[in-house]
Structures are given as C-alpha cells and as structure tokens.
Amino acid sequence: MKNFKTLLFITLMSSLCLTAQNKDTKKADKQFSRFEFVKAAESYNKLIENGKGDSYVYRQLAESYYNIFNTVEAERWYAKALESSQEPEMIYKYSQMLKANGKYAESNEQMEKFASMRPADDRATAFRKNPDYLPKILERGKKFNVQNADFNSEQSDFGGTMYDDKLYITSSRNDNRKTYGWNQEPFLDIYSMAQNSDGSYQAATLMNDEINTRFHEGLVAFAPDGKTMYFSRESYFEKDYEKDSISKVRYSQLYLFKATKLGSDWDTVESLAVNSENYSVKNPSISTDGKTMYFSSNMPGGYGNFDIYKTAINEDGTLGEPQNMGQKVNTEGQEMFPYISSTNTLYFSSNGHLGLGGLDVFYTKEIDGKIAPIRNVGIPINSNADDFAFTIDEEAEEGFVSSNREGGKGSDDVYAFKKLQPLCDVLVTATVLDDKTREPLSGASVSLYDAEGNMIVTKTSNADGIAEFIVECEKDTELEVTIDDYDSKKVVVKGSNEEEVNVQISLDPIEKLIIADKIELAPIYFDFDKSNITAQAAFELDKLVQIMKKYPELVINATSHTDSRGPESYNQLLSQRRAKSTQQYVISKGIDESRITAEGKGESDLKVKCGQNCTDDEHQLNRRSEFIIVSGGSETE
C-alpha cells in the first residue's frame, strides 16, 4: 500500500506538470515569467478560446490579472480555477478580489474557507477578530474655527509664537536667500510681527543676523521673563556636518540655540549642550514656570524617528539630562512640534497615532508622573495633510496651527483658530471644487470607504459639486474623489457627533504632478516581499495613466527601489519584478508598451543611507517607485 501511494503521488505530479506546462502554454508561460502580464493574459485567453483551457491556464490567467489589479477579470478566473482546486492561497486572493469588487458577503465566505484551512495565518486571525468589517461611519464635531492668516506668503510659513504683543513665525519668503533643493524655496528665516490693537498684524520683520543665517532657522520659544529666546538652526553654522564621499553631498543636523535679549534686540547666541553631531534636536517649548524645556529629537534610544523629550532648565540656564516622554506619547513614527500650554497640556504633532493623515495635532497631560490618554484635537485643526506647530492661549482660547493643506497661499501656511464647542451629526456632505477657481466640479466620482478600506458606495457629484452620504457616528471614514484632468485625492473624515459634516475637497489639475523631469506620485507601496499591484498602488498609477493619455508623446521609465534588508541579488530581482508589475499595470490600462519601460534598481540607490540602523520609516522611504520622463516632457509645459 505504501508503494502504491508513492506511485500514485508521482503519477499525479507528473500529470500536473504535463497539464501545467506544455508546448501550448510555452509562450504564455514565458511572458508570465518575464512579468509581461498584459501579454500573458492575452496568450492565456487565446488558449481558452481555442479550447485548451484547464485549471493551470485559469489560474495563470487569474494571476496575470491579479498582478495588474484587474479585479473583475481576476475574480472571474480565480472562480474558474477553484472549481477544480482548493489551494488556500488562491482562495485568499479570490476573497480579496471579491472584496475589491464590493462583494463583501462572498468575500467573507471565501475568507472563512481560508481561515479554516490556515487558522494560524495572521490574515486569518485578523479576519476572525473582526469579521463584520462593513463600515459604520464617524465624524467627530468641530472644536475650532480655523482661518488662513492674512500674513501668509506664497512660500512656506509656519509657527506662531506670541510674546510681548509680537508674533514670531518661520518663513522662506526671503528671496535674497539661496534656494533649498528639497522644495525649491529659499532657506528659512525667523520673522516677527507686531500686533495691532484690532488684532491684525504689521508687516513681517526679518530678525537680525545674530539670529538668522544663510542656513535654516526654525521655531522659537521664550523664557517666562522674556530675556531668553530658544530656537533651532542647522548645524552647518557650527561647521558640523558629514560629507558623502561619492555624491559630495553634505548632511547636517538640527541644533538648539538660545539668545539673550539686549535692549530691544537679541544677541549672544549660544549652542545648547543637548546638541550632538550624531542626531538632531528641534522644536523647543518652555513651560510656564520656565523650569522645563520640551523638544523633539531623533537621538538614540527613542521609540521611532523623532520623539518628544523634556529636560530641566537649571537656575544657571544649563540643561539637565533629556527624558523621553515615553511610549504612550512616542510611537514608531514621528512625534514633533511639542507645545506645553499654561494648563500644562502637552500638544504635539504625530504621524504615528491614529489621525486624519500626515501629521496630526494631539494632546495629553502628565499627571503625577503618568501620561493621560493621547487624544486627537480633531477637525478642522487636523486635516488629511500635515498639521503642526500648534500653539494656544488657553485663557483666550485662541492660537495658531500650521498646515500644508489644500487651499493655502503657500506650501505651508499659518492658520489662526478660535476654540469652539463640539457638536455631532451623521450626514457627510462632500463638496468637490477646482482648487484654483473654487468653482464646483460636477461629475466627479466620490467613493466612501470605511476605516478598514472597504468601499461602501460610490456617488457622482451634482451640478453644485455635492455628494451626500448617510453614515453612523463614531467611526472614521475616507472619501476618494476622481475626475478626468484632475489629481485624484483621498480625504480622511474623522468621526463626529455633528448633525452635518461638510467636507470640501479641492482638486488640482493633473499637471501639478509633473515636476521637472518626473511624475511625482505618492509612494507606490508593495506588500512585504510581494510584487503584485495593490489597490493603493493602482490608485496612484491611475494618475500616471491619466497623464500619459492626456500627453500621448510622453515616454516614462518606471524605476523600482528596495530597502537594504535581504541579499543584494534578491533585492535586485524583487525590484525588477515590482517595476515590471508597475509597467504591466499601465499597459493594461491602454498605454502602448513602447511608452513605458521598467527598471529595477534594487538597493543600489538608497534614498536614506542608514546602514543597519534604519527605522521602519526609513526602510519605507527606500522602498519606492519613481517615474522619470524620458521624452515628450516639453508638451506638458
């Protein structure tokens, strides 16, 4: 009996090999192995049309569509392949395609099958913890009235520290400064503005050359007596930097300094002892009693990239040992821009805590040495963009927050706010506008997603640019907006108890993604060790497809990069597969294959050279795709 079973197994495997790969599938299999999934799908389809389809061909066809995120066809052919196979991983992929196509009940059925076959799989465990993933939508009430400040420029402006009837901000509006390559704006300087009796502000005044240099200066904070000002500056000024031996690029840190007031001006700038050429320290804030400084740093021993720290300010002005604010405040992401208010409430910005997107403003208190729960300040202080540098006069209930949200005057703007009482509701009204003209956009596709990323419903904006959704309270949701000739956008809607929540979604022309010789998309993320196109990747790549259809002479080279984990040779192959999948997705959307090439870079061109000490965020920055304009770029100008 044992020999019979062994013989039967060998016979079955031989039969599978014969039906799996033979002279009929040779062409399609070769295309598939070269990651030419569009051509492979065409070839497998031809085999089926000629009556040569079997479970192997059905699966390969499904896999081809899966890798270019053609969810409808992938669902169809996975279903066909599963008529004669119950392979767990194929069941899982089938469930994901059903889910992507809005068939949640059917998807759940397949996930139940998968979970019963592989109960220890993390995906199965997560599903069984939350099988009822259909959305119940939440929007928390507005707590503040926020207005774009009149003094913003067309450059970057942020901060908002009030002291002695003057407002201090950081700005790149000084056109006499050298341009910074990161964002093609002048280097940052510190400005002050006197406040008028009616609450308006006089023209911004550049602070003196003891404070401002030809390098970046950052946010300021004051000692309670007004005699000491703390601020951040690049370490280039101290001649502390590292120079890459190959690229010759110099890398600096951010240092903290203090200046002493002499008469009506500032002088005697000193570097603080907390500075180190091995890490950055920035964003100072001083407690009301003047005894504690809060700041952010990426010094060793933290929980993430930048963490919030505090340190004692001694009577002689020296600093004590920095203390990390702990894991409740700090995450594996970034925590920055601390502000300690007169009520000892610690406000800070983070992309590691649950928020609306980018950096959000959070708050907490330290009571008897313990950190109170971390709470999101909510909308409209927070948006789907970066929101930071929050300061507040607790008695007057007004302050400032900075943001790079849509609708601003520059890349970063300062917003003035007034604290309000929150309300609650269940109606989300989305208004889609042209960001430049502020005119409503009709015919936009507005899709509602739950917090787990499941699409609930899609509506079309009316003549007034409005699409309305009835939702449940206390669940986060996301709106995805697409329309021809505009950059698609996703906007997180935070849960609320208001009767009505209005979300204004301003769309930029698609051309704004064309920057110099590149198409600048949001990061194209792949699952770990995978190369198939995900829903998030498809959302971004559809923007590339839209641009290439609008400009038919455009030729693109799609490059894929990995992080430095794993063998170099393996990373090279992985990046090539990802680049090919990217190329194949674009081709599947109607772009001629001659107009897009694929190039895997592996770990040969790391964006962040962090060696063996990379954080997860730094690894993610290295795992990226870039879209370089090879030719035809002049037609977009």
Image (cartoon, rainbow, N blue to C red):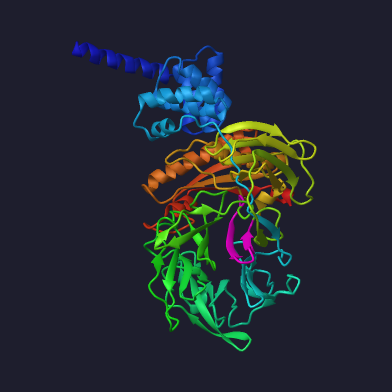
Q: Position of residue 281 (x, y in %)?
A: 47, 69
**Depth check, front residue: 327 or 123:** 327
- Tell me where residue 171 sits by quadrant: bottom right
- Residue 71 seen anywhere in this rendered image of the structure: yes
Residue 482 vertical position relative to residue 191 in the rendered view, above or below: above
Q: Residue furthest left?
A: 2
* Residue 512 % position (x, y): 69, 51
Residue 509 magenta? no
- At x 46%, y 40%, the residue is 527
Q: Which one is nearer the viewer's eye here, 624 or 145?
A: 145
Q: Residue 252, percent across and down? A: 49, 70
- Residue 375 or 535: which is nearer the viewer? 375
Q: Residue at x 39, y 67 (%)?
A: 323
> Which quadrant: the N terminus?
top left
Q: 286 left or right of 208?
A: left
Q: Which residues are magenta?
A: 383-404
